[in-house]
Image (cartoon, helix red, strand yellow):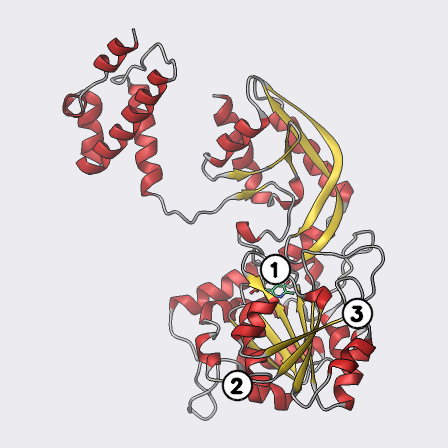
Amino acid sequence: MPENLFEQLPAIDKWLASETGISLTAEFARTEVVDVMREHLNEVREGISNGLTELPDFNSPEYAALIRSDLLRKKSPSLRRIINATGVIIHTNLGRAPLADEAIEAMVRIARGYSNLELDLVSGQRGSRYQHVESLLCRITGAESALVVNNCAASVVLALSTFASGHEVVISRGELVEIGGSFRIPEIISKSTANMVEVGTTNKTRIEDYAAALSSETRVLLSVHPSNYKIIGFSEKTDSRELATLAQQNELIFMQDLGSGALADIKTGVSITEQLVQKSVADGADILTFSGDKLLGGPQSGIILGRTELIDAIKQNPLLRAFRIDKLSLAALVATLRLYLPPNDPAKKVPVLRMINEEEKSVDRRARNLLRQLRKIPGLTGTVVADVSYGGGGALPMSEIPTSILRIEMAGMSAGGLARRLRETDPPVIVRVKKDFLIVDPRTVLPEDVNDLVRAFRQIAG
Ligand SMILES: *Cc1c(COP(=O)(O)O)cnc(C)c1O
């Protein structure tokens, strides 16, 4: 009878006085232990209501271990390292770009002590935090001047509010996009206190459309990379060189929000066809904005390139202070950018580029090695099959990279259930579930994560 089971649940006081309770309260605060015991009892009560017919042994060492692991989990920080087995390289939910060793070392160096963040060591006078990165960005991209803020969204707001506040920004209807959750171009323009003038249609916008919309109030022609959105088929987009020319003829600013910010070529054979920042600079964009933690592979930051008089005007905008980059991100960004200069090869040194460029053959070899280890786990079966990795949402629309994945099944467990159990391991493992299969893509699994990944599956198998 279920009623009996309810009556057999231990009272918290009695449970606390048991051997389990005594050992747990020796290690954790009494209130913490009580909270977790209550949660467990509530769960069991719910179980009884749903047909559970046998109670667990609340006083067993195994049950004490279960409560202990819950207590430990509650104590551990919420923000944790995870293993990305999804094959999505630039994943906003998973922290975007893993940093290069050089960038991590630079952050540690600057974090540990004081730095000349805003001190000119030659004159002993106040310096600018931006001087540490400006010439490097100009050298890599060919831009005249550069500025860095805390993310690309801030770059766009800052530039628009500097150049178009109270005036008009002309933009194609095909580029009024929403990028990742809450970054909506029309709202960003309105928050920059500029007036949006939409031209063309969703699928086609020509240079004549822009030309016809110009007025004495126009200040900026804005082009936005549609990022996670793509119009295919009957469509037409205006060439950026034409826009640069139109802007120049009318003494306007042509601003391009590139989003991803590719500074190095991607290996051929991958469907990533991002225009290089260097090309946009050469095509004559007056202002360019892009993220530091997408294709560039650095820390969260927003980069603004442009003509010196324009960058100087942005530096006068009081909003810059609110959007300024912090010293740790700045240190990591500088170190990452240096990997783009010879004799370094960014394709080898920058993790995001290394993952994108890894040959399918090499991923396949890693997949087979991993499977060999996983197959030793009782109840686990798997195969290696061809599939695709993804550049990542918000950065590289629909870019697919040929890869080799593991399709894994565990006896008595659904793919969704297994994925959930993997999220509960330490470190959590994030996978893809496609149809009824659990997919592990080794492309985004860092070499140092392999042992933890195997251990996670072993733990779940019991
Ligand atoms: C990602 C993206 C942004 C926002 O960049 P954050 O660095 O996330 O602020 C802005 N514009 C475009 C085109 C993007 O792709």
* Mark identifier at residue 179: 1
Give the class, few, some or many, for how many residues have Cα within 10 Å of label 3's Cα (few <14, many ≥20).
many
Q: Mark 3 or 2 closer to N-term? A: 3
Closer to the eye: label 1 or 3: 3
Q: Give the image location of residue 146, x and y in percent.
A: 61, 81
Q: Secondary structure at mark 3?
A: loop
Residue 423 located left or right of residue 14: right
Provide residue 329's location: percent of width, then percent of height.
Answer: 50, 67
In this view, the mark in front (2 or 1): 1
Ligand 1 is found in the corner quadrant, namely: bottom right
Say if mark 1 contacts mark 3, CB within 8 Å: no
Q: Nearer the viewer, residue 52 or 389?
A: 52
| SS state under label 2 | helix
Residue depth check, mark 3 versus mark 2: number of the one nearer the observer: 3
Residue drawn at 80 percent across, 72 percent down: 238
Is any atom of residue 63 visible in this view? Answer: yes
Q: Nearer the viewer, residue 401 or 245?
A: 245
Tag on residue 315? 2
Residue 205's tag is 3
- Residue at 51 percent across and 70 percent down: it is 150
Q: Residue at x 33, y 40 (%)?
A: 74
- For label 1, the SS is strand
The disc at residue 333 is none
Query: Considering only vertical position in the picture, is 165 above or below 2?
Result: below
